[in-house]
Amino acid sequence: MKPVLTEENRARLLSVKAFFARCGIPDMFMCRFVGLYFIISGIILQIQRKEHVHSVNHWKDYIKAMPTGKAIAGFVLGFIALTAIYYFIPKKFKIIDQILLFGGTMFFSLSLMWRNDNYYLAIGVSMIAAVFISYLMGKVSHEKLENFPEKPTVVIIFSLMAIVLMFVALMSVYRHKVFGSSTYDFGIFAQMFYSMKEHFTAVTTCERDKFLSHFNVHASFIYYLLLPVYALVPKEETLLVSQAVLVISGVIPLYLIVKNRGFNGAIRIAACVVYIFYGGLVAPCFYDYHENSFLPTLLMWLMYAVDRKKYILFYIMSALTCIVKEDAPLYVICISLYVLIEENGWKRLHGLIMMGISGIYFILINKWLGEYGDGEMMASTRFGNLTLEKGDSLMSIVSNVLKDPGYFFSLLIQERSLMFFFQIMFSLMFLPFMTRKLQRYLLMIPFIIMNLVVGTSYAYAAQLGYQYIFGPSCLLIYLAIVNASELEHERRNTLMTTASVVCVITAFCLISGRISGYESYKKREDYWRHLEECLDRVPQDARVIVNTWFLPHLADREEVYIFDKNDFTTNPDVQSDYFGDIATGLKDMNRYDFYVLSTGDENTEIAIPYLQEGGFRCVDGTEDYILMFASAEWLAAHPDYEQTHPDLLTPE
């Protein structure tokens, strides 16, 4: 027989239930519990990091050192305090648990990934965070999120843009200051801009070991737009800062796109955060310097022009995109074809016209590079898996794909391609695929060709951290925004917020470790300045051959060459682990006035005896890193040359 509740007991039960409801239980229990757990865990992570105990790599030591009693006590007291606060605060402020869950999830995730370059761990952490953020979005008022005031929205977005831009720019510069940049791919551009400033050409000597315009290698005429900036501040650091500005400032047209697409308040912030922290945009900024860094800003303005039907801007940005590189017209062709199908009536004509112009330019510029430049080598390097013969042109590659699409499709399902595909798409919550409009997939073609297909034979194209993902990232982000704008609001808001969280977490994994260059410089600032001053003493008019890590610091001259094992003569009959053949001498020693070598380079140890035999004298350097050898002929022609270190003896 079931017990019968009396009116008094029923009243007591309702009173207890009302009490717990006013405390946020059970409605906010999960938010409070998980959020507080992550806060406590994040604090312990920070404490243990100071003791150099890593929660993943040294997990046994981490657990042994954990103050378990204090952690439990802190959790219990915190839970009680939060419950009391929730009980007493007015209803309109009862969002502390949602804020706690969001803040705790982010605090723990970012604490774990700070200076941790384990990208697989970042994916795992992001997945867990995505689950809790998705849960959280069911506990918040989407109307309030979208009604977040306009001015704070703008301030937050552009403050985040400024912070990330400054971080990327500064850490790139300090990486260079501690000799972390090399000939490929920074020294060649440093010398190219020196050449452009001095005589308006793009001639380099270090790129192909001879006098050659960089435009014979890549048709990157866009660089002339940056020349006035470099001419005002002619330093290598100017290029690195400009790269950060070009990449991150693409959020400005993106902001206008999301505003036009009906993203409001906190959701507009989330959409812009996706761009600002997207791994395919921030990570490549730390791999020296490249022309592809023009693509994010140009493509985002181009997509803004498409989105708002501003066709004059469409033509201008299309033209500028085409001159970024010889393969950049592919972006314009795909976008123009998208416009041709997406638009109605006479507006389609703009897509047809631009597709024709960019297609003709694509054919002509690649034909010119193949006949007069380095186009055949670049095509065989990037598209070697699609060529029948060495030296095949890009047009023959297109023909091969059309003739055998099965082989082309097989390249998309290789392990490296699939892994890279997941890395790129997961950060966008696979939003680029959430559409039934087939024409939108045209904007995915550059990613498929330039990254997934090329990456099967040219590994750098399918890795985060290299410049080949700059352009495709922008089109994928645009696709994500457009597709999300057509979803039901709550689903759109959840996916966009989750994507922004994943992007921030993975970005911390990819770039937070770059602070090590800054720390290294500050710890030994006098040392790094001493090295720079030493290299500055190399005579400006001298013909210099130099270690690859020194070359970017010596690129502001007419002739500078990279020193590597190709500068040795060898004996093909005798093998060695390093050369394959045993070195028997140095090639063309009389071609150079100065050898600037690193003491830590195996080439240096082998070269010194041959330099001494050839009459070169050690005239400058530092005790532990740099050695400078000048030829006897150059010294004889410059009798007034003062040896900065007369006591520095030629090494035996």
Image (cartoon, rainbow, N blue to C red):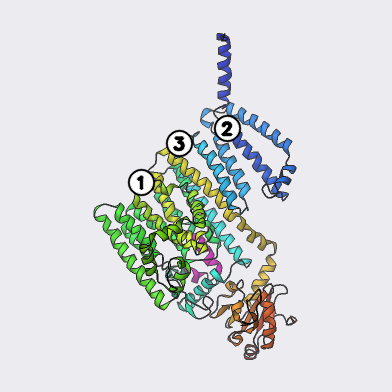
Of residue 428 and residue 525, the one placed in the foreground of this image is: 428
Q: Distance between the Cα atoms at labels 2 and 1? A: 36 Å
Is 259 displayed left or right of 350 in the figure? right
Q: Is residue 78 visible?
A: yes
Q: Position of residue 563 (x, y in %)?
A: 60, 77
Q: Is residue 336 above or below residue 190?
A: above
User: Which numbered disc flags the more N-terminal residue, 1 or 3?
Assistant: 3
- Circles 2, 3 touching at the beta carbon (< 8 Å): no
Q: Position of residue 578 (x, y in %)?
A: 65, 74
Quarter of the picture containing the C terminus is bottom right
Residue bearing the label numbered 2 = 30
**Residue 436 marker:** 1
Is 207 displayed left or right of 254 in the figure? right
User: Which numbered disc flags the more N-terminal residue, 2 or 1?
Assistant: 2
Going by the numbered disc 2, the residue's amino acid type is Met
Going by the numbered disc 3, the residue's amino acid type is His
Q: Examine the structure image and report whether residue 238 is included in the region drawn in magenta.
A: yes
Task: Tell me the SS state at disc 2.
Answer: helix
Q: Is residue 307 above or below residue 67?
A: below
Q: Position of residue 152 (x, y in %)?
A: 48, 44
Query: Which image quadrant is residue 104 in?
Result: top right
Looking at the rendering, the stretch of residues picked out in magenta corresponds to: 227-246
**Residue 323 marker:** none
Task: Tell me the SS state at disc 1.
Answer: loop
User: Which numbered disc flags the more N-terminal residue, 2 or 3?
Assistant: 2
Give the number of the mark in front: 1 or 3: 1
Residue bearing the label numbered 3 = 142
Q: Position of residue 436 (x, y in %)?
A: 35, 46
> Alpha-carbon neighbours of circle 1 within 10 Å: few (<14), some, or many (≥20)?
few
Q: Distance between the Cα atoms at labels 1 and 3? A: 26 Å
Going by the numbered disc 1, the residue's amino acid type is Arg
